[in-house]
Amino acid sequence: MRFIFDRNTWQEIFGSISKNKMRTVITVVGVLWGIFIYIALSGAAKGMDNGFESIFETIARNSMFVWAQNTSMPNEGYKTGRQMQLKLDDAVMIQNRIPEVEYIAPRNVRGFFGSAPANIGRNNKTGSYSLFGDFPAFTKIAPKKIYDGGRFLNDKDIEQSRKVAVIGERTQKELFDKDENPIGGYFKIDDVFFQVIGVHKFEQSGGFGGDGDIFIPFSTFKKLYNTGDDVGWFSIAAYDNADVIKVEENIKSLLKNIHHVHPDDDRAFGSFNLGEQFNKIVGFADGITFLSLIVGIATIFAGVIGIGNILLISVKERTKELGVRRALGATPAEVRNQIILESVFLTVIAGIMGIILGALALAGINSATQDIDFPYTNPTVPIPFVIGALVIMVVLGTLIGLIPAQRAVSIKPIDALREE
């Protein structure tokens, strides 16, 4: 390995490169472009992946929503167009009959789907806000960040139908004074007093809602608006290893059976499978990453072959020089190692330059996508992937360098000295 640190070795390498400057630059650009494409595309795909990951941090990835609609087929004496209505017992049946369901949260709302919002008042301040009737299990599906000193709804609130509420940041600002602690304070929901037990921080969770939303116990909502056991919709989370598409199908089939709906009626119950959408997004990002890997490796390989061709030309042009070196005592190993080292050197330099340019491109993309609405965050490439790409380049550079190196070793000194 001493030849690597030999000054004469590097003088000969740089002398060879300087004789073919333009060809060397063009060939190096080929390798550089390959690693640049790999870094840029992989980082861009990772940025998309990170963006959707940040959205799904606030909601279970294998989650879905199910609601009732109208039937489109007659069944068991029931006519077409029958209005379906989800019930609390449906949630119990789903939980017991479908083992892949981890959590299910029946939900009701005022202020969405055509219903009037709740009228909220405190002292002389009034407003209209969306009001949700929820179970504690809802936070297992879509976690809520509650400011210090507060809490979300619990089982006791449900059992005792407590008049307690979790309010949003905007609700706090509009109903309470700036320095006033809302926890423990009272306000009216449609002329009924409720006590504030928490303030939630609004985060987009892939569903709907806003920073003024108010959450009260489902049982209290039922009494306040006389909804009985009616449910607006179910928020459902399946286990991580479950097939979310199959779970969705099983839930709908069970609901059809419970409510005497024709098995082929696909309009009686609507649904939105967030887990399926997430899997599609992840698959798309993985596809982009794989494509960038294939394109990058192919381009790198083409560039490395170009380096091998340049070295073959260099060996041909240096036939007499190599013959003199052999005549003066240079061993075949010394000649071979110099050619291979030159190949690896050019490959690594091109790779490092490509990585730097790729990193600069990702930094520019990150800066340009800071304030856009599309979920895109921190486009990066993991360090092990970058190191792996460099290792591949070194291996390819070594292998491709063996061809001109073997050509150089095969030159006989007496034939080289005759070369004009």
Image (cartoon, rainbow, N blue to C red):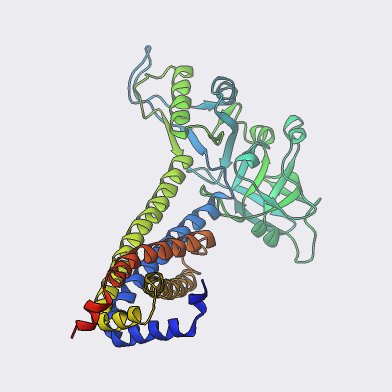
Above or below residue 366? Residue 323 is below
Classify 345 as above or below 151: below
Q: Residue at x 62, y 35 (%)?
A: 225
Residue 403, how many percent across, how many down? Answer: 30, 66
Residue pictured at 66% horizontal, 44% vertical: 215
Q: Is residue 364 left or right of residue 54?
A: left
Nearest the eye: 364 or 67: 364
State left or right for residue 33 relative to residue 1. Answer: left
Q: Position of residue 9 (x, y in %)?
A: 44, 81
Q: Position of residue 216 (x, y in %)?
A: 68, 41
| Residue 337 visible from this viewpoint | yes
Can residue 373 be seen here? Answer: no
Quarter of the picture containing the C terminus is: bottom left
Which image quadrant for residue 257? top left
Compared to 203, does 368 lie above or below? Answer: below
Q: Is residue 332 left or right of residue 416?
A: right
Residue at image location 40% in from the left, 27% down from the top: 268
Image-quadrant location for residue 89: top right
* Relative horizontal placement of residue 389, taking residue 198 as reference (left or right): left
Residue in the foreground of this view, choosing between 393 and 163: 393
Give the total number of marks visible in the rendering: 0
Residue 338 placement (x, y as % from top left)? 40, 75
| Observer-nearest of 107 and 355 | 355
